[in-house]
Image: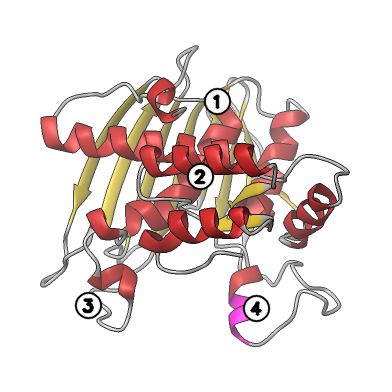
Amino acid sequence: MVATPNHLHATQAITALELGLAAVVDKPIALSTREAGTMLAAAERTGRPLAAFQNRRWDSDFLLLRETVAGDQLGGLFRVESRFERFRPEVNTASWREETPPGAGGGLLLDLGSHLIDQAHVLLGKPQRVYAEISLARPGAVADDDCFLALEFPGGARAHLWMSTQAPSIGPRWRVWGRRRALEVWGLDPQEGYIRAGGRPTDPGYGGPDGSQRAVLTEGGEGGAARELPLPAGRYGDFYAGMAAAIRGEGPVPVPAQAGRDVLAVIEAARASVATGRVVTPDFAGAAG
């Protein structure tokens, strides 16, 4: 498991693969699509499994969203709004993510942005157009701390993604519109907080609702009926179970490293959008090596 500062991911993962080990690499899997390409080439050369640790595919809210989409409860998706907002108005000088410039691996876009982009990719596929606003909003900031991305997908669906440390008012985690209904979710999946507080994934009730989240399904139309939906338990353990099966040769890795490289293609497009003030088409072909 490579969970070191981001600039070390590529070299450490390649070293592990060349030693004959399987490798799981925390997001972002690398600093660039070029680096990610060298990692995938090493995995192919050595024949060892390489996975991206996009654990928020197993957040309770994302599991619920995928369930409602799979059951066609919303109708065809055409707008997805996804937020990961906090209010931390001062730079944390003890955090390497906040004290490291983006080019060396710091900032919210590489950190939380990797999760939000990956989730949008799972829901809607690869975006064909990217517009971004990326800011260093706090006094003394050297890494981006307030970001917005607008993604357009084939067929016309759009995703708007926010990640910020500068949100005195926290918006819904999800606001998703289908052709018939909308789903809104407030609050964050409790798994990370539970583990940080000393809990273990093997504890009874791990990942289950703790009252911090709320999901509402609303019928389309003025005055449409709304009802709360129960949130399933989050299941980060499913990633590790899938990885163990892949190591035994019993199935694919739970999140292919290719998915991590596709995330980086979107991040590179977002940075190009900020630099040019234009909408940018991600270079997924170039990301393939």
Q: Earlier in the sequence, mark 1 or mark 3?
A: 3
Q: Are marks 4 and 1 in contact (CB under 8 Å)?
A: no
Segment tinted magenta in the rendering: 193-197
Question: Mark 1, mark 3: which one is toward the viewer?
Answer: 1
Q: Whole-Å distance between the Cαs marked 2 and 4? A: 32 Å
Q: Would you name the residue on which mark 3 appears?
A: 90
Q: Which circle's residue, 1 or 2, is located before the other in the chain?
A: 2
- Which badge, 2 or 3, is on the more N-terminal residue? 2
Disc 1 and disc 2: Cα gap in Å? 23 Å
Question: Which residue does the image show at 49% across and 55% down from the upper left?
Answer: 27
**Alpha carbons under labels 1 and 3: distance apart:** 36 Å
Amino acid carrying label 2: it is Met
Main SS of the magenta part reads helix
Q: CA distance from mark 3 to mark 4?
A: 25 Å
Looking at the rendering, which quadrant does residue 211 occupy?
Answer: bottom right
The answer to which image quadrant residue 87 occupies is bottom left
For marks 3 and 4 on the same chain, the one whose residue lies earlier in the sequence: 3
Mark 2 or 4: the one toward you: 2
Q: List x then y, in percent, for residue 289.
A: 44, 29
Q: Amino acid at mark 1?
A: Gly
Amino acid type for the residue under numbered disc 4: Tyr
Whether residue 98 is visible here, answered yes or no, is yes
**Mark 1 sits on what residue?**
125
Number of other residues with Cα within 10 Å of mark 1, as a class: few under 14, some 14 to 19, many 20 or more: few
Could you tell me which secondary element the residue under label 3 belongs to? Answer: loop
Residue highlighted by disc 4: 194
Looking at the rendered structure, the secondary structure element under dot 4 is helix
Asked if disc 2 and disc 3 are in contact, CB closer than 8 Å, the reply is: no
Mark 1 or 2: the one toward you: 2
Residue placed under numbered mark 2 in the picture: 39
Which residue does the image show at 83% across and 76% down from the upper left? 202
